[in-house]
Amino acid sequence: MAQPEDRELDPDDLLSTLEVIEAQPLATRAEAYDALHDTLARRLEAAPGGAPAS
């Protein structure tokens, strides 16, 4: 299963990641989307003026 990496994602990389996730069997998509969510949330929180802690 392809997992998003904790690296800079440009829009093309994000689209590619989503395409890979969508090509996976339904049973594994939730885990891949959860990993992508975690990666994007960490990036948002680490950015200057990042999201406030919940």
Image (cartoon, rainbow, N blue to C red):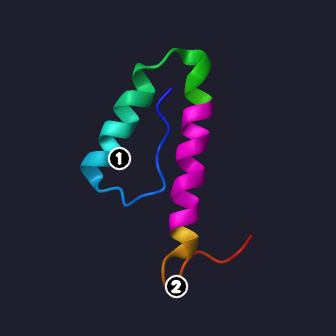
Per the image, the residue denoted by label 1 is: 14
Q: Residue 36, image x and y in percent?
A: 52, 45
- Report the residue at 51% width, 57% height from top: 40
Q: Residue at position x 46%, y 49% from top? A: 5
Pick whichever, 26 or 46, lies toward us.
46
- In magenta segment, residue 10: no
Horizontal side, residue 46 vs residue 54: left or right? left
Residue count near mark 2 (Cα–Cα under 10 Å), binned few <14, some 14–19, many ≥20: few
The C terminus lies in which quarter of the figure?
Answer: bottom right
On screen, 14 above or below 45? above
Q: Amino acid at mark 1?
A: Leu
Q: Quadrant of residue 21?
A: top left
Horizontal side of residue 48 vs 28, given as left or right: left
Q: Quadrant of residue 17?
A: top left
What main secondary structure does the magenta stretch of the protein show? helix
Q: Which residue is mark 2?
A: 49
**Residue stretch rendered in magenta on the structure:** 31-43
Amino acid type at mark 2: Gly
Of all residues shown, which one is farthest toward the left?
Answer: 12
Name the residue located 30 percent from the left edge and 47 percent from the top edge: 13
Mark 2 residue element: loop
Is residue 34 part of the magenta span, yes or no?
yes
Q: From what the image shows, is residue 17 above or below residue 24?
A: below
